[in-house]
Image: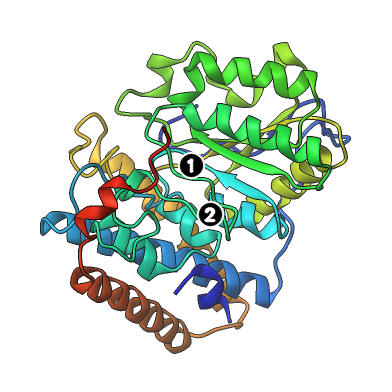
């Protein structure tokens, strides 16, 4: 089951959103996050919880040796992709790096197919040949997780060029992290995107630590919303732990670029609870720091609290939602571990000569 189906620079804190001069209010700050109604809150809660439970199960299967290779979990960052997708429309594209399972589910890809690919089975989205970092769905306009750091930025810019060339009105949402933001091809892409006024939103998921080095030690400019300044690309810093703030910023950015005004940068200030990958013990940060983020800023807990406070759902109802999502995730794991491996002949398909 997919998300759609379920629907029926301080390392310890997340800074408040602020906008660049391209999207100012009278105060010079980004507008406050729009209030969600009951349906929006419940939708966001279910979608983010599906990603959380799926990633927890993926981590469990990895520990059991059923998932091999690299595996980068999205736990803690769920509000970013869900808020962005709430603002996108049919036909808009998504491309990202290797922390990609959440993006797949958010675009409507089925949990069974994603989990099957993680375990290298024939029903996976890349027929069991791509694994965690390399699966795609043209039907859902998901153009991949990519293992080359920053490589997806150039590809996303190419997708945006194709959109403009075809005049189809689509926008490409291109995700990358704070570490990838220091790659050279990112700035080559920025330059071309602004020159040609391409319909693209660059979403920088700043989770503070890249592969394992604090952003304050690795980046001379830690305000990533300003990374496009020399190319005249507007940007905003956004509280990436608040799905409402993400959706509001996404609506502004997507409307800007869809109107033909060129690219836009959104720096999502977020936080991953696990290590860079499953093989990373994350000893470079204090346990107290992670616990504080979970306690004070967890994106799912924020929505849960609002639902209860506004009496839009009670504890029993939320437990039933969680149980239903766990059942979907458990089903995907059961399917993925019993689905056959691809036939050896699959090695010779999808080869370009």
Residue 235 on image: x %, y %:
71, 29
Q: Mark 1 points at which residue?
A: 270
Q: Which residue is drawn at 48% across and 45% down?
A: 144
Q: Nearer the viewer, residue 35 or 219?
A: 219
Task: Give above or below for 144 relative to 26.
Answer: below
Q: Residues within 10 Å of mark 2 (few under 14, many from 20)?
A: many
**Count of labels shown?**
2
Marks 2,1: beta carbons within 8 A: yes
Residue 95 on image: x %, y %:
54, 42
Asked if residue 81 shows in the view, the reply is: yes
Which residue reaches farthest left? Answer: 64
Q: Nearer the viewer, residue 189 or 179?
A: 189
Task: Give above or below for 88 relative to 159.
Answer: below
Q: Residue at x 71, y 60 (%)?
A: 90
Q: Residue at x 36, y 70 (%)?
A: 112
- What is the spatial separation of the Cα atoms under label 2 and label 1, in whole angstroms? 9 Å
Which mark is drawn over residue 187?
A: none
Q: Which residue is drawn at 48% across and 17% down?
A: 182
Q: Residues within 10 Å of mark 1 (few under 14, many from 20)?
A: many
Residue 105 on image: x %, y %:
47, 61
Asked if residue 266 shows in the view, the reply is: no
Which picture quadrant has residue 272? top left
Q: Nearer the viewer, residue 206 or 90?
A: 90
Which picture quadrant has residue 133? top left
Residue 255 on image: x %, y %:
82, 45
Q: Name the residue under label 2.
A: 79
Q: What element carries label 2?
A: helix
Q: Is residue 246 left or right of residue 68?
A: right
Q: Is mark 1 on a helix, strand or loop?
A: loop
Q: Specify which label sits upstream in the sequence, 2 or 1.
A: 2
């Amino acid at each position: 089951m997919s998300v759609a189906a379920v629907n029926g620079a301080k390392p310890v804190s997340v800074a408040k959103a602020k906008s660049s001069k391209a999207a100012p209010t009278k105060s010079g700050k980004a507008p406050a996050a729009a209030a969600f109604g009951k349906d929006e809150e419940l939708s966001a809660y279910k979608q983010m919880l599906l990603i959380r439970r799926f990633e927890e199960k993926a981590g469990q299967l990895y520990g059991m040796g059923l998932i091999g290779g690299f595996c980068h979990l999205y736990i803690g960052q769920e509000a970013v992709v869900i808020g962005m997708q709430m603002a996108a429309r049919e036909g808009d594209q998504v491309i990202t790096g290797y922390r990609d399972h959440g993006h797949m589910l958010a675009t409507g890809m089925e949990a069974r197919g994603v989990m099957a690919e993680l375990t290298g089975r024939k029903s996976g989205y890349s027929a069991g040949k791509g694994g965690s970092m390399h699966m795609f769905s043209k039907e859902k306009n998901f153009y991949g997780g990519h293992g080359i750091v920053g490589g997806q930025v150039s590809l996303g810019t190419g997708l945006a060029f194709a959109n403009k060339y075809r005049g189809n009105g689509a926008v490409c949402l291109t995700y990358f992290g704070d570490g990838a933001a220091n790659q050279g091809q990112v700035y080559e892409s920025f330059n071309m995107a602004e020159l040609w006024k391409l319909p693209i939103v660059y979403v920088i998921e700043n989770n503070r630590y890249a592969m394992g080095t604090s952003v304050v030690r690795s980046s001379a400019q830690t305000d990533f919303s300003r990374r496009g300044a020399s190319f005249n690309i507007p940007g905003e810093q956004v509280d990436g732990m608040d799905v409402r703030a993400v959706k509001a910023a996404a609506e502004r950015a997507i409307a800007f670029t869809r109107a033909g005004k060129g690219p836009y940068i959104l720096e999502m200030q977020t936080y991953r609870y696990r290590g860079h990958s499953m093989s990373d013990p994350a000893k470079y940060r204090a346990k107290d720091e992670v616990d504080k983020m979970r306690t004070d800023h967890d994106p799912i807990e924020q929505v849960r609290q609002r639902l209860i406070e506004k009496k839009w759902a009670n504890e029993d109802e939320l437990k039933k939602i969680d149980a239903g999502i766990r059942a979907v995730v458990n089903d995907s794991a059961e399917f993925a571990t019993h689905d056959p491996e691809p036939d050896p002949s699959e090695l010779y398909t999808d080869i370009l000569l």
